[in-house]
Image: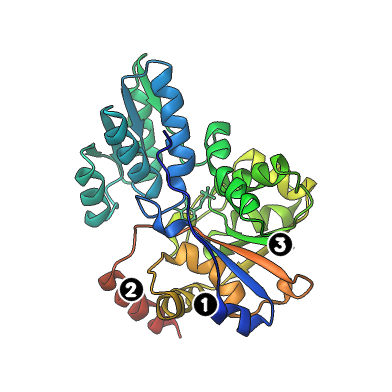
Amino acid sequence: MSLHISTPLVESRALSKICNKSIWLKLEAVQPVGSFKIRGIGFACERLAAQGKTRFVSSSGGNAGLAVSYAGRMLSIPVTVVVPENTSTRAILLIREQGADVIVHGASWQEANSMAQALLKEEDGFLHPFDDPDLWQGHASMIDEINAAGVRPDGIVLSVGGGGLFAGVAKGLARNGLPDVPIITAETAGAASLARSVTAGKRITLDTIDTIATSLGAKRVCERAYELATTRDVRCVEVEDRDALRAVHTFLDDHRLLVEPACGASLALAYDNHPVLAPLETIIVIVCGGAGVAEATLSQWDNSLRDYA
Ligand SMILES: *Cc1c(COP(=O)(O)O)cnc(C)c1O
């Protein structure tokens, strides 16, 4: 039994008209915990359960930690998530709602992660949010579904944080005989760890993360992501926070789905008919979703970005 669902693949009339192309949406926002993460995390958790692990441990206060908590509940395996002090009360509530133990520790993710590592016992399974081949294999299932639906894209747009989604989509394309389909990666400028690495010609670590798209906030992408970006057809794009946020609003109006700015970054490329799309006719945008957004958070972001304008 898989822990994720097969998601709808729908053509967006609104975006197709803006771009004068055929724009399709893979609606990962409707997954049980609101994002694609459950595909890879669910796959990895099932493997760990089969290996006899009796507890799952995570250090993500975001969608990965939430997916681990959901997977643990579905598999009747206890989950402990260690999150840093700056994690939102809402995120902690959502994880606790799944029945997981949440330990709040440390000023940064590094400290929370160190504690999570120190907690690990022989019979525990640790779930990394993006750097794990099992995760990529699970994420790849979204491409199996797209292939089965018979839609042949000229390009796929997706958001990049640490690069797990990217590695999974690349894997999915390869295993469906579509290794040459270009991947367009979207990052916000304050979290552009992949685009900046490609420009630098080496995998770099960002000094700081400065974006409302917190789910993209990995200072360094995984090695696999950098390798893919330099060996297959990948086109990296950076967008501004305000464009990602505008896309979130317009997408809510057009498709009645509320997604994080992390997902808005990908949607912004289509809403702005970005030049990177020009040579492509049929495009699939991975609507990665995200549970870290609510009506109240949206207006906070609106206000914070207004101050910059
Ligand atoms: C995790 C996440 C991302 C980024 O995925 P990576 O695998 O870290 O690149 C993007 N959007 C949402 C909503 C996420 O939860």
The label on residue 243 is: 1
Task: Report x, y in % for residue 192.
Answer: 59, 59
Q: Is residue 87 left or right of residue 279?
A: left
Which color scheme did the rendering employ for the protein?
rainbow
Which amino acid type is marked by label 2? Leu
Q: Quadrant of residue 300?
A: bottom left
Mark 2 — residue?
A: 298
Task: Identify the mark nearer the N-term, 2 or 1.
Answer: 1
Instruction: Determine if the C-beta at disc 3 is less than 8 A from ligand 1.
Output: no
Name the secondary structure under disc 1: helix
Residue 89 in percent (x, y) is at 22, 55
What's under tag 1, amino acid-wise? Answer: Asp
Q: Quadrant of residue 275?
A: bottom right
Which three-letter amino acid code belongs to the residue tagged 3? Gly
Q: Residue at x 47, y 34 (%)?
A: 43
Q: Determine the residue positioned at 49% across, 56% down.
A: 216
In this image, 44 relative to 83: left or right? right
Residue that badge 3 annotates: 155
- Between the residue at mark 2 and the residue at mark 3, the CA separation in whole angstroms equals 30 Å
Q: Nearer the viewer, residue 88 or 69?
A: 69
Viewer-closest of 286 and 131 = 286
**Residue 77 percent location from the top left of the image:** 28, 27
Q: Earlier in the sequence, mark 1 or mark 3?
A: 3
Cα distance between the residues tagged 2 and 1: 14 Å
Mark 3 residue element: strand
- Residue at horizontal 23 percent and vertical 56 percent from the top: 90
Q: Nearer the viewer, residue 118 or 145?
A: 145
Q: Are marks 1 and 3 in contact (CB under 8 Å)?
A: no
Q: Looking at the image, is mark 1 or mark 3 nearer the viewer?
A: 3
